[in-house]
Image (cartoon, rainbow, N blue to C red):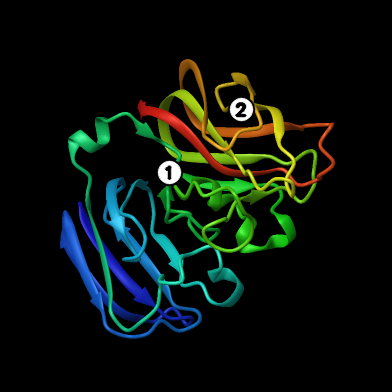
Amino acid sequence: MKLTVSVKNAAGETLASATGEGRVFLEYKAAYQPGDVVCLASDEAGYVVAQLEDSLPETFGRLNAEARLPIPFEERRICYSPKAFVGEEHLIWARCATEAEISARRNLALNPLDCHANQGLFPHATANVETRGEASFEARNAIDGIYANEGHGVYPYSSWGINRDPNAALTIDFGRAVTVDEVVVTLRNDFPHDNWWQSAVIRFDDGSSETLHFEKVAWPQHTAIAPRTVRTATLEQLIQCPDDPSPFPALTQLELWGTEA
């Protein structure tokens, strides 16, 4: 699989690019400007491990089309580490995933590189509501692998916020068929500011669903489910605690464990 990484500006012009067979590295020696985008493309769909920003962890994903990571500025930066995207020296790389990595059981929902603009590197998170449209409360925050949950707002306390909407739903698109056998939920734990969900439903595109039950705890809550092969999963029917006066429940992380189908 031939891989290409590049940096493009707001006009779509390529500022730097590198291509390699099975593995590619790009050293970008300039400060990012508003409108810049880091891109990852290949000549065929396949599994990759990529690090498009060297302050973020390397990410396993299914590359189905060009992946785009817009460089965040101002309010869009607050859910990332202050060390991210700064300076005039950036190492961008990607490689084909190994067979051992592809076959391993793992959190199939994890993607620290996800964002609204990502339509190529899966999994990808979307939601029907995000609190005030702010970066701190986007769907992507629930799959970025950051578990700090005793605050809210700026990094490292980003979360998926539902803007008090009782019909809020979060969907994970895996971009291919996967087999899911466990759901792990980490609720935001910023009490007394927060409320919390007592239960939720996880619905899959094969027509099946599972009801999840939660406690008011800070750590990840595990639910084993019968294995099923699916392409999407939606967390919905979020029932918050009626006895808690706060109107602000939120989700820190959603994990969906399993294997490639």
In the rendered structure, which amino acid carries the disc numbered 2?
Ile
Q: Residue at x 61, y 19 (%)?
A: 210
**Which of 78 and 157 lies nearest the eye of the viewer?**
157
Identify the image quadrant of the C terminus. Answer: top left
Instruction: Name the N-terminal-most of marks 2 and 1.
Output: 1
Q: Secondary structure at mark 1?
A: loop
Disc on res. 203 = none
Q: Which residue is mark 1?
A: 110
- What is the crowding at mark 1: few (fewer than 14 residues within 10 Å), some, or many (at least 20)? many
Q: Is residue 49 above or below residue 237?
A: below
Q: Which residue is mark 2?
A: 202
Q: For this view, does 215 lie left or right of residue 61?
A: right
Q: Residue at x 61, y 26 (%)?
A: 203
Q: Within the image, what quadrant is residue 177 found in?
A: top left
Give residue 66's position: percent from left, percent from top.
38, 59
Give residue 78's position: percent from left, percent from top.
56, 68
Q: Residue at x 32, y 84 (%)?
A: 88
Give residue 154's position: percent from left, percent from top.
59, 64
Determine the residue located farthest toward the top in the rendered image: 226
Q: For this view, does 239 lie left or right of residue 255?
A: right
State if disc 1 and disc 2 touch (CB < 8 Å). no
**Gap between marks 2 and 1, in whole Å?**
17 Å
Determine the residue located farthest toward the front in the rendered image: 192
Q: Secondary structure at mark 2?
A: strand
In the rendered structure, which amino acid carries the disc numbered 1?
Leu
Q: Residue at x 20, y 67 (%)?
A: 25
